[in-house]
């Protein structure tokens, strides 16, 4: 009899455990973080899951930003989209126009009854993901900006002061020449060339990348990156390429590996490369501000964000949206956001996270990690607030194609930028027609 009761009790406990497990709401999160950043994403999900019992966030790597966005569109049409989608900043205008596919993050938080104060987030980040009506549309997650990474050991070997990195483009050219003379075959390279050399270059110098306040003022924005200043800069880089001072390593983040390995001594790229460099570089490294042209009035101004935000997909259950809201609230906690900033090199998305990091002494202990923050917290102008254009993914591809023609010597800087403007504007016109057709 006792054995029978014991078996019945055990069976009841197992059944109760099964019911409890089934009651846990699963939240699927598609992302594009690989390597050290992929480990960070997985850790965030695991820590949140361990902090409560009602929800389970399941992070799923879906390839590059382009690939994950394309997959999400197909999944939404098929009725099996993820709950959360990480979208890079150039996809913002496209997501904003996809009204039926997304639910604004402010709405998600409000309906879930979770406290949400947009003013808690860094202004430059918040503003980029906020609609004209003031509603925040996506959750700021991994915001970065462009900086100059440099190899201090290589600087020493070239007779350069490792504690006085180049500030202007003239300084960069001189440093590159000394690095080459010391035997470096790749003095300077760049990742995300359109983002660093045209987008951030524009806002850093307080000049337009596109009309209509870089797209914030309307769908009829058009590219203006063939101005005399833009032509001058790309022409200078093309000349450096011919002299072996600037080496093009490919699109996207392809050049990052050449810097981390020590092959290239300087790189303009994302502040978020910090996590990879810190873990894998075998040399003493430094981080400094983007170079600028000293004769341009008002420069430097401020850089703009890169990275991505988290969008909530439509068509889910209320209970699932509550889980999404709880997860976002967790990510916004000052200690969680501060740890993420310190670990990755991404910007602290909340003001509290920045203050906590500063008070901890992290910036003093890790020189250069505050560069991205300093570049972003400057007062913005209509020309430097950010760049938000439709079909931006396609425009970046066009920019890549045209700049590659310039680096290879097949087109002049002016011809390449003229062609980029013409082809890019065709994409903007196409997006304008499509978006207006939905209204």
Image (tube, rainbow, N blue to C red):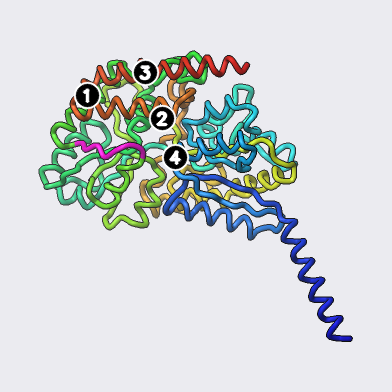
Quadrant in the picture for residue 350? top right
Which image quadrant for residue 115? Answer: top right
Query: Residue drawn 62% across and 45% down?
Result: 328
- Along the viewing direction, whichever of 251 and 53 lies nearer the viewer: 251
Q: Look at mark 4 in the image and give the residue it sits on.
A: 144
Pick the residue in front: 232 or 373: 232
Badge 2 or badge 3: first in the primary sequence: 2
Q: Nearer the viewer, mark 4 or mark 2?
A: 4
Residue at (50% x, 40% y) in the render: 68
Helix, strand or loop under label 2: loop
**Mark 1 vs 3, N-terminal side:** 1
Q: Which residue is mark 1?
A: 235
Residue that appears at 60% across and 22% down:
132
Q: Residues within 10 Å of mark 2 (few under 14, many from 20)?
A: many
Q: Which residue is mark 2?
A: 302
The residue wearing badge 3 is 423
As helix, strand or loop, the secondary structure at mark 4 comes to strand
Magenta stretch: give its range: 246-252
How many angstroms separate mark 4 from mark 3 (CA)? 28 Å
| Front: mark 4 or 1 | 1
Q: Which mark is nearer the camera, 2 or 3?
A: 3
Residue 413 in sight in this render: yes
- Which numbered disc, 2 or 1, marks the residue that appears first in the sequence? 1
Q: Residue furthest left?
A: 181
Q: Alpha carbon of mark 2 to alpha carbon of mark 1: how far?
A: 23 Å
């Amino acid at each position: 009899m006792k054995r029978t009761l014991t078996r019945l009790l055990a069976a009841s406990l197992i059944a109760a455990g099964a019911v409890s497990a089934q009651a846990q709401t699963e939240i699927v999160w598609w992302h594009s973080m690989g390597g050290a950043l992929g480990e960070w994403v997985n850790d965030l999900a695991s820590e949140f899951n361990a902090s409560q019992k009602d929800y389970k966030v399941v992070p799923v790597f879906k390839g590059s930003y382009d690939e994950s966005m394309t997959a999400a569109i197909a999944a939404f049409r098929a009725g099996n989209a993820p709950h959360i989608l990480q979208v890079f900043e150039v996809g913002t205008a496209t997501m904003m126009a996809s009204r039926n596919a997304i639910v604004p993050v402010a709405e998600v938080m409000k309906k879930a009854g979770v406290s949400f104060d947009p003013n808690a987030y860094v202004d430059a980040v918040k503003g980029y993901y906020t609609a004209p009506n003031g509603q925040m549309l996506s959750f700021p997650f991994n915001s970065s900006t462009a900086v100059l990474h440099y190899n201090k050991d290589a600087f020493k070997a070239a007779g350069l002061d490792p504690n006085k990195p180049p500030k202007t483009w003239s300084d960069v050219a001189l440093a590159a020449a000394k690095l080459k003379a010391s035997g470096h075959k790749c003095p300077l390279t760049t990742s995300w060339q359109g983002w660093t050399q045209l987008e951030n270059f524009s806002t850093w110098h307080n000049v337009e990348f596109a009309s209509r306040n870089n797209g914030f003022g309307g769908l009829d924005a058009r590219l203006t990156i063939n101005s005399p200043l833009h032509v001058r800069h790309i022409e200078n880089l093309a000349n450096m390429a011919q002299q072996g001072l600037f080496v093009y390593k490919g699109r996207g983040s392809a050049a990052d590996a050449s810097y981390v390995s020590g092959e290239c001594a300087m790189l303009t790229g994302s502040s978020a490369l910090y996590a990879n460099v810190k873990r894998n570089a075998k040399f003493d490294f430094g981080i400094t501000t983007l170079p600028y042209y000293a004769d341009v009035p008002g420069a430097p101004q401020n850089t703009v964000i890169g990275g991505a935000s988290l969008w909530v997909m439509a068509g889910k259950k209320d209970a699932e949206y509550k889980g999404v809201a709880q997860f976002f609230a967790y990510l916004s906690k000052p200690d969680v956001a501060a740890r993420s900033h310190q670990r990755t090199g991404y910007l602290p998305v909340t003001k509290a996270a920045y203050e906590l990091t500063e008070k901890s002494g992290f910036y003093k202990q890790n020189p250069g990690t505050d560069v991205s923050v300093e570049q972003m917290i400057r007062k913005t102008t209509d020309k430097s607030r950010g760049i938000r254009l439709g079909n931006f993914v396609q425009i970046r591809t066009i920019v890549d194609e045209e700049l590659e023609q310039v680096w290879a010597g097949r087109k002049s800087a002016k011809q390449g930028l003229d062609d980029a403007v013409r082809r890019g504007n065709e994409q903007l016109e196409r997006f304008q027609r499509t978006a207006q057709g939905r209204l």
